[in-house]
Structure formats: C-alpha cells, structure tokens
Amino acid sequence: MKFAWENDVMPLGNFIASLVLIVVIFGGLFFILYKVAKRRATFILLSLAFVFFLAAFLLNLPIVCTLIAFISAAGLAGCFFANLGDVRKFIANPFSRATAKAANFGIEKIYDTQLLYKNIESAVISLSNARIGAIMTFEKNTDLKDIMKNGVPIHAPVTPEILLTIFYPGTRLHDGAVVIHGNEIIAASVFFTPTTKPFAGKYGSRHRAAIGISEVSDAVTVVVSEETGRISFAVNGDLESVNQANFLRAFENYMADHSAEE
C-alpha cells in the first residue's frame, strides 16, 4: 500500500496543500458548531469524523474519504436544521462570544435586583389591566447596540411611571419596544425584524417582533397585548403566556443566567 505522499499522481506540494485544506475545513466546521450547537456529543462525532477522514486520506483511500465526507455532510445538515434559531444568531453576529457580557453603557451600577423586578412587575400588570400594548426587551449577553440604532435613546431609570408614560397611547414613543440594560432604559421606539415563522394562532406585530428579536439574541422580551391585556414572554424563538400572579416568578426564571448549566 502506498501512502498519499508516496502516490505518483499527487506531488508532495499538492499533498501538503490538500492536508492544509482539510485542516482548515474541519477547523471552520468546529468553529461554526461551537457557535451553533454547543453540545459535547456533536464535537465528539466531528472529532471522530476528522480522525477517520485524515487517516483515510493519509492511507490513500479515496472511497473511504468520500463515504466519511458524505456521512459528515448529512450529519451537519441535520445539526443545522435542528438548531435553526441558533443559526440565525450566528449569521446575525458570527464573531460574538456566547459568554460575553452585554454592551457596557458606562460604568455598571450596583442596584437592588428585587426592587427592579418588582417595578417591572408593577408596570406590566398596570399595562395589562389597562390593556395598553407594550413590548419590553431585557438585554442579557447578546449585544443589541446595533439593533437599537433605529430607536430613540432614553437612558432613564426603570420605574413604573416612566414605562407607563412611554407606552401610553398617543405618545410619540409608544410604538416599538423599549430596550432595558440592567436597571436602565437604554432606548424606546425600537423596531425589531418580525419573525417569519408560521403560527397556528393569531399574533400581532408586537408579538411577531418579540419572537423575531428572541430568535437572534438571548434577550428576554415581555409583550402585553393591546386587545386582551395578555402577558407573554418571547425567549429563544418561542412565545409563552403567563398570568399576572405568576409573572414575577417566570420573569426571574427567564432572567437567570443558566449558561453555567449548559
């Protein structure tokens, strides 16, 4: 048996170039899967595919190389289809770090988280009771600075009074979303790209916009329906309704950082 570098058909220069290309391709796949799937089993399978493909290449077994490449391509396609939401996030910002902190809007302040959450609960319940439509997006790890460019800078503290004033019908800022970072309202009247996913129920522009931003970020978005006063959460491309009594508990759970558990 002749090894690949001993094959008369493939000069040494072509062999080295092919070897570098294989390493670059698999390195790119590792990077994309790290951004998209983030599952240990996926990396193990890809590592095994790389080892077997490299061994087949070095042993000059083109049929085995073709078979491994075909199986790997099918597996990658399945992985991408199973993680379409994460693929959208990767396309929107391919070089962001999953564990990166949100944009630094000045010096981070120490604040009472429980008081902040109670203020948000108070505002959301008041909006729900009055059936005033609202959409509030709470930034977590994904930087929303570029998305906020179409909004109006606010940089105001999070209080029920300010939130109710912003969303009061007839005001210039009541359309669109407010984006909140920590205990500060960064911007208002921010418009998100709505989702294109089909849904069985009827969803208005606010709900579709909320789902849209949740598909490209890890932000938590609260939506209050103008027609029914229903409260919903948009997270990771899904929409879940919650009653007023359970809002605070659900909000705390969604805002908790579970990255360490993944």
Image: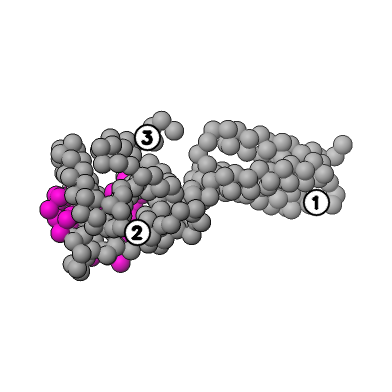
Distance from disc 1 to disc 3, alpha carbons, whole Å, reads: 51 Å
Residue 178 picture location, percent across and down: 25, 57
Report if residue 24 lies within the magenta region.
Answer: no
| Residues tagged 2 and 1 counted as in contact (Cβ below 8 A) | no
Magenta residues, start to end: 136-165
What is the residue that sits farthest to the left in this orientation?
161
* Mark 2 vs 1, N-terminal side: 1
Disc 3 target residue: 258
* Mark 3 vs 2, N-terminal side: 2
Q: Amino acid at mark 1?
A: Met
State the image quarter where residue 122 is shown.
top left
Distance from disc 2 to disc 1, alpha carbons, whole Å, reads: 60 Å
Disc 2 target residue: 206
Which disc is residue 10 wearing?
A: 1
In the rendered image, the quadrant that contains the N terminus is: top right
| Residues tagged 1 and 3 counted as in contact (Cβ below 8 A) | no
- Point out the frontmost of discs 1 and 3: 3
Residue at image position (77%, 46%) is 66
Residue 92 picture location, percent across and down: 45, 57
Residue at image position (33%, 63%) is 191
